[in-house]
Amino acid sequence: MPYTQFMATLVCVPIMVTDEASALRDAAAARDAGADMVEFRVDDSFAGAGDEEDAARVARLASRSPLPCILTCRPTWEGGHYDGDDDVRVAMFERACVGLQSGEHAPRYIDVELAAYNRSDNLRLKVNLCVDPRESEHATGLILSSHDFNSRPADLTRRMLSMRSHETSRVHKVAFRARSLRDNIELFELLRHADRPMIALGMGEFGLMSRVLAPKFGAFLTFASLRDSTATAPGQPTVAQLLETYRFRSIRASTRMYGVIGWPVSHSLSPRIHNAGFGELGIDAVYLPMPIGAGVTPKDNDASLKATLSELIEYSPLDFSGCSVTIPHKESLVRIARELGWEVDASAAMIGAANTVVIAREGERVRVRIFNSDAPAAIESIKSATEGGSIAGLTIGVVGAGGAGRAVAFGSAMAGATPIIFNRDRARAEELANAVVTATGVSARAEAWEGMAGAACDVWVNCTPLGMSNGPAPETLAIPGSALSRGAIVLDTVYTPRETPLVKAARECGCRVVEGLEMFVRQAAIQFEAWTGMPAPMGTIRRTVMAALTPAEG
Ligand code: NAP
């Protein structure tokens, strides 16, 4: 019989114990940050002598914890640091659970690896004497766990059956390295069909979904770190990210999932802004980074995007309802949408790139639609700097002929302006200009990259990464100063930093400047409205973007 969790999913902070004082300080900080439980990993501190005094120290630590705790002494063969004798670590568990001295109390849980528990009758017998299978605040429960740090274990089903055969365990834990977003689905299925409280987590960047959506699938707990551990534990959010950005406490079975697909995607601002928007309007939804690797060829890219998107859409318990799509998948999205018979809106078809997927479910029927919000966002941003709100008749210098350049060129032409395209690779500029003329009938032309210096345009739009921090040339001015005439409108689509070399130079030349974050906010708002049917909370979105970009400037 599947088990149904009625309690809220707990947030547990793992603490690698080096000494008692710092472990207790971290546990108090975890409590203050909003966590419900801590896991004391004593495999390092207990690895030394492992004598009675060591065991007494561990018992004292568990007793003094300001939050209910899990006590774990993970051996090296299961990815931990303890390489001592099993008898010694079991004696430590006995001391902490049943050998208590006056004033001490037992840990809420101990975690023992399924492999150790199965391997030795003696260990099993002793562990069983430490724990009580019945839910109780006063007796220690057993978490039987199984980890694979490389990939999904081939014998996962066998491991699950073995766990279930042991009546003594109160909680089951499975954690393996997720190799793609699709691995999360199997973890969710384990949770949905669990026969008792369960933890099912994907390690690594691809597993973040399993950690954040744990309450949606009734998990017993999820782990979150106290400090940013992106470098050492990618995919493990901090308590603050989990509770504030992802609004973990409001996630429930009905919560719809959205996200941003790209590679790399872990630094995207989109999760912050869409989650803030959902929070502001009380929408039962959460938005996650969704990494999908870049293929070596466009064909590889299409194949991995198609496989992952299709599987996530088909898995109805996920309530996957839409996503943003960014580099390098925007063009693949149009190709796979055509192949799968999804609706492709006219401008996405023309541009050949899309950045938004909207998934509507009516009973069994799933309707998928894609469109491009970059083009209207760029054009609306430019219009906001004009006197009359129109760009008809203006010449638009489009610098770059990639995804953003295509969106701006087609968007300008459709708004009655004349795009002039400058691209490092001239042939690509020519190809785009011809495509614009063919599709819209508006005059458009390509000019030499070097010709920019002497060109005169009413509006300039930088659609290259020039000037972007961490980009190919952060100090480079994307458009020569000689082209920036007083009164011209300049939109730099780059928004990290806010004050790019182009923004700075354009201000000094007396241009009307539109920052890239204006376009970014608008494209996000268009997506938000398409997904929710509600007006986007612009104030919240703008504030969130500003707050996120401010430290990057410093
Ligand atoms: P993309 O498809 O990869 O195109 C990159 C373009 O930049 C190409 O035209 C490329 O020229 C050019 N380029 C790259 N490195 C260059 C260099 N060192 N010197 C001169 N030209 C160079 O990328 P994308 O999607 O169009 O994005 C481009 C920029 O737009 C990004 O920086 C992104 O931040 C920004 N963007 C902003 C928003 C927003 O909402 N504000 C939205 C979308 C994009 P070649 O063809 O010669 O390689």
Image: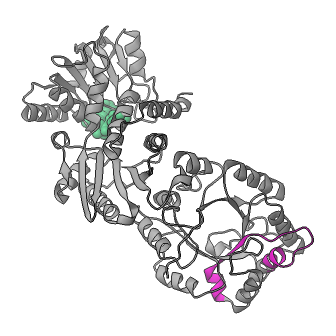
Residue at image point 30% right, 45% down? 356
- The reply to whether residue 497 is visible in this rendering is yes
Part of the protein shown in magenta: 91-119
Q: Give 2 or 417, whichever is nearer the viewer.
A: 2
Asked if residue 548 is among those painted magenta in the image, a careful observer would answer no
- The reply to whether residue 465 is visible in this rendering is no
Q: Is residue 421 left or right of residue 213?
A: left
Tell me residue 425's x, y (percent).
Answer: 22, 33
* Position above or below: 253 against 76: above
Rendering quadrant holding ligand 1: top left
* Position above or below: 124 against 24: below
Tell me residue 67's x, y (percent).
Answer: 74, 59
Tell me residue 326's x, y (percent).
Answer: 34, 45
Tell me residue 429's x, y (percent).
Answer: 18, 32
Residue at image point 44% right, 34% down? 541
Q: Residue furthest right?
A: 102
Q: Give 463 or 111, whichever is nearer the viewer.
A: 111
* Position above or below: 437 against 60: above
Q: Which quadrant of the structure image shows residue 310? A: bottom left
Q: Give 288 or 510, whichever is nearer the viewer.
A: 288
Residue at image point 71% right, 72% down? 109
Q: How are the colours assigned in the image?
A: one colour
* Position above or below: 486 against 56: above
